[in-house]
Amino acid sequence: MRPRGLLLFAAAYFVILELLLVAAALAWPAFLENIGALRSMAAPIPVLGAAMDQIQERGFPAYLLAQHFFKGCNTLGAAAAVLFAAPAVAGEAHRGTLELWLARPLSRRRILLERWGAGALALCVPIFLTTLTIPILAERIDEWDPLGPYLECALHQSLFLLAIYAVAFLWSTLGSHPGAIALWMLFVTTFEFAIYMIKVWTHWSLFRLCDIQTLLDVIDHGLDVPLVGGLVLASAACLGASLFAFERRTP
Amino acid sequence: MSERASVESGVISIAGLARRFGLVQAVHPLSVRIGPGGITGLLGPNGSGKSTLLRMLIGLVRPNAGAAAVDGARLVGDGLAVRRRVAYLCGEIHAYGELTGRSHLAWCLRGRPRASLQRAIDLAKRFELPLAKPVRSYSHGMKRQLFLAAALAPDVRVRILDEPTEGLDPTRRREVLELLREDAARGTTLLFSSHHLGEVARTCERQLFLRRGELLDENAAGALRERARLALRVTWPAAPDASELERVLVPLGPIEKRLDGASATFFFPGGLADGRAALLALLLSSALPDPRAIEYGEPSLADLYRELYGVEGV
């Protein structure tokens, strides 16, 4: 994706995330009023029931984590990660511009890192920007929450999405069909999100690494270093493999 | 990479460079020294390995064996050292349609000194390209000219151009060839691939022939040129009757010939002078129609191409 296109997509992604966040935050008083009824409605789906229990127990922070991070960032962010990464290299091959892209007097390492970095920024910056508006929104509904823990959650969320982005990017470095890469990656992430909702399979889902309980633990105890380290390691490994493949790629 | 390529300014030095794609040996180990200075044409039919060789030289395709050095920079790793010293024109014209011509030039020349962009813009204006318009509105030939402007702008000692005139109209083609000649006159080493024998014959001081990934030994090419020089080519208004032609040639004894539609090429083992007059006398006194053209002496590049590849060049 060209820089201007990436910027537009990132802006659209930010706007949608922020709109979802605003809507969710402003709906909190009504949600709180009806939480009992909502809990009963969610009961048939144990995973949702458990989420409602967490919200009932912890109040606004848990609600916000569920709405903004678990629902908003995980679904929209995962899609954005795939859509930003899939055309990164494969898109150039598909449109025939790979030779032109590589023929400039720039090292392949630099070319790839620039593109990887641009996509990663486009993916993560909107998460942080929207998170920065949480205290303002909380104040409007007479809630007060410190920003720090939410920023840690945003960091955790970003690293989780970066891991997905890095996998899709690696595939893009190896392939030449961005559409197929995007479709397969979206299928896998949707499947992973779907199995999270099935109680007996929840622990097999990747989204277990960034669910409400995990993010509540981040708020309570700070970043889980082994988990965050694992996510960073996964991204770094994929980036390393991408660099290795890209150095050898033939236009 | 056991062979060593000599590292000299303005010189393209290739030592045993080879590339295989799966089971296909795209380029067999080849060695050649080009420059300093001058225009060298790389000829060969489609699939002969021209583009792969050029791509290897600037690090776009990694060689499986051999070594190369361009303008004093050895081809190692991703070829960055070479790309910094060489301007390259892609053979395939796929552009970023959403960019304007000017932005596209700037994008292509990223990593080059600023002055290159201004030269490229001047060249593009000389080609009358609408630089403010998106590249998607350009024709194929206009895109080629835009790419050419970017390839001819950098102040480098070596340019590698993959089919620089493909898709251009005859006027623009002449203009581009003139630009290449001017560039060579300034001491630049130019290596370009082409299918157009005429332009290669007019522009290049030296021609390299690739056949199925193998560079023909220049001595062998010279021998073929000599063989073509000693051949006599007769063209009739229509394809001659082969049996009648055989009958006419009987008095000359065994003679090597190649019949190709309305033309026939005759080779005289003892030299052209030995059989030329007798052959023409026999042909003119036969029942065959009078020839439309009789060619001999200095062979054209087309003759040589036909000799090398057994097919007509363009």
Image (cartoon, rainbow, N blue to C red):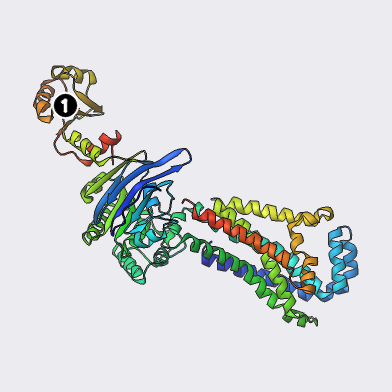
Tell me if residue A32 can be seen: yes
What percent of the width, then of the height, locates residue A149? 74, 76
- Secondary element at tag 1: loop
Q: Is residue B198 left or right of residue B282?
A: right
- Residue drawn at x 74%, y 64% as measured from the top left: A210
Crowdedness near tag 1: few (<14), some (14–19) or many (≥20) residues, C-alpha within 10 Å: few
x, y percent for residue B248: 16, 19
Task: State the image quarter where residue A18 is shown.
Answer: bottom right
B281 lies left or right of B32: left
- Classify residue A132 by image quadrant: bottom right
Give the residue displayed 16% in from the left and 35% down from the top. Answer: B229
Front residue (pair B189, B229)? B189
Identity of the residue drawn at 22% across and 62% down: B186
Q: How many marks?
A: 1
Subunit of label 1? B
Quadrant of the rendering where the C terminus of chain B is positioned: top left
Looking at the picture, tell me which residue is in the foreground, B16 or A82.
B16
Q: Nearer the viewer, residue A33 or A187?
A: A187
Quadrant location of residue A194? bottom right
Q: Is residue B152 left or right of residue B110?
A: left
Residue underneath mark 1:
B269
Figure check: B253 above or below B226: above
Q: Residue A52 at x, y = what percent?
A: 85, 66
Judge whether A51 appears above or below B40 on screen.
Answer: below
Is residue A79 among what the camera can see? Answer: no
Residue A78 x %, y %: 67, 61
- Looking at the rendered structure, the kind of residue marked 1 is Pro
Q: Is residue B261 above or below residue A58?
A: above
